[in-house]
Amino acid sequence: MDEKSTAPAVPAEQEIIISREFAAPLQFVYKAWTVQELMARWWGPKDFTNPICELDVRPSGEIRIDMKAPDGTVYPMAGIFHEIIEPETLIFTSTAFQDERGKWQLEVFNTVDFEEKEGKTLVNVQARIIEKSPATEASVAGMEQGWNESFDKLQELLKDTAAFADRLDCF
């Protein structure tokens, strides 16, 4: 199903591109991105958990993930889906780091493409920084590492076929 909403104009000020091949079928990898119970198990850097993970995967649907660091600090993240082309592409904006007035200090426009090749799935993430503040510089600098650590966790989840059994129409 191809669905679109109005996506913001995205300047190419700063961009992070991450690609990873997963030894899992496209349908599993796509579901890991679109089923909140699955995404909660892998999203975020190593040793982070997600006590709240809410996804409304449709154009203009909202994202809310509270990432909890090992020290107990909770980092809320929000976002909006702009375009869903199942199971090929997800386009969404994510925001993080609210200031004392509730204004988000970091905004990222994300395009995630999925491609199946011989039973494996290639995932390409393009993350364009739309807005950042001096307070978010360290997080932006660590974004590539954070994505790679998330992908390490996703690879481990994808080894657990049972996690997908009740979430896929094909079983």
Image: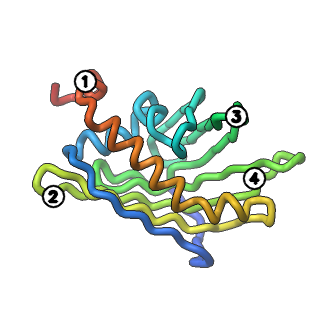
Density class for disc 4 (Cα within 10 Å; few <14, some 14-19, many ≥20) is some
What residue sits 40% from the left and 32% below the top? 38
Residues at marks 1 and 2, CA–CA distance in whole angstroms: 22 Å
Tell me: 40 left or right of 33.
Answer: right
Contact, CB < 8 Å: mark 2 with mark 4? no
Give the foreground label among 1 and 4.
1
The residue under label 4 is 104
The residue under label 3 is 71
Query: Image quadrant for the C terminus?
Result: top left
Callout 1 secondary element: helix
Asked which quadrant contains residue 157, the reply is: top left
Going by the numbered disc 4, the residue's amino acid type is Trp
Between 130 and 143, the residue placed more toward the observer is 143
Q: Where 133 sits versus 38, above or below?
A: below
Tell me: 27 left or right of 113.
Answer: left
Going by the numbered disc 1, the residue's amino acid type is Ala
